[in-house]
Image: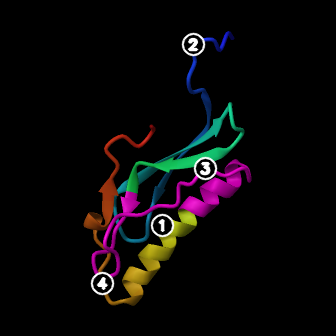
């Protein structure tokens, strides 16, 4: 492939669906490899925001060189951590905790 006019090039490596605890909302996760930098990134359809403990939605999506399994695990761990913090603070799990990303795959 000629890359003359390509400003960004990445490969979709895997796609996953998860449900977090008692929340009946599907979270889709796509794992990409940036073919220019070699870094990996897991991007979720939703971030988590537990109002009782967070000011803004969050999910760990930083690109990393550590491989696709690592970035997927890091993202899932961050979602689980905030879910567990919310539950341990006494908040009832709610679908409102999951904030849809407007353009999750960009």
Please give the residue where the numbered disc 1 appears in the rendered image. Answer: 79
How far across and how far down the image is residue 33, in percent?
Answer: 65, 38
Dividing the picture into quarters, in which one does residue 98 lie? bottom left
* Left or right for 67, reference 61: right
Q: Position of residue 84 (x, y in %)?
A: 45, 80
Which one is nearer the viewer's eye here, 81 or 28?
Answer: 81
The label number, if any, that marks residue 5 in the structure image: 2
How far separated are the C-alphas under marks 3 and 4? Answer: 31 Å
Report the mark closest to the observer, 2 or 3. Answer: 2
* CA neighbours of label 1 inside 10 A, class few (<14), some (14 to 19), many (20+): many
The residue under label 4 is 91
Write down the quadrant of residue 71 in the picture.
bottom right
The mark closer to the camera, 4 or 2, is 2
Query: Residue at the spot x=61%, y=50% of the render?
Result: 63
Residue appearing at x 45%, y 37% in the figure: 106
Foreground mark, 1 or 3, reads 3
The answer to which of 102 and 86 lies nearer the viewer is 102
How far apart, in angstroms, are the residues tagged by discs 4 and 2?
50 Å
Of callouts 2 and 3, the N-terminal one: 2
SS class, disc 2: loop
Residue 94 is drawn in which quadrant?
bottom left
Pointer 3 or 4: first along the chain: 3
Let me know if residue 52 is in the magenta part: yes
Taking depth in this image into account, of 63 and 43 the one nearest to the observer is: 63
In the picture, the disc for residue 63 is: 3
- Mark 4–mark 1 contact, CB under 8 Å? no
Q: Where residue 36 sits in the image (x, y, percent)?
A: 68, 31
Q: CA distance from mark 2 to mark 3?
A: 23 Å
Q: Earlier in the sequence, mark 4 or mark 1?
A: 1
Please report whichever mark, 2 or 1, sits nearer to the chain's N-terminal start: 2
């Amino acid at each position: 492939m000629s890359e003359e006019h390509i400003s960004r090039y990445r490969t979709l490596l895997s796609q996953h669906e998860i449900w977090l605890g008692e929340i009946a909302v599907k979270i889709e996760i796509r794992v990409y490899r940036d073919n220019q930098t070699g870094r990996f990134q897991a991007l979720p359809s939703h971030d988590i925001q537990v109002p009782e403990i967070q000011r803004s939605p969050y999910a760990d999506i930083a690109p990393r060189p550590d491989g696709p399994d690592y970035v997927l695990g890091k993202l899932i761990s961050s979602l689980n951590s905030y879910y567990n913090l919310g539950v341990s603070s006494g908040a009832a799990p709610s679908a409102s905790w999951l904030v849809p990303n407007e353009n999750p795959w960009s």
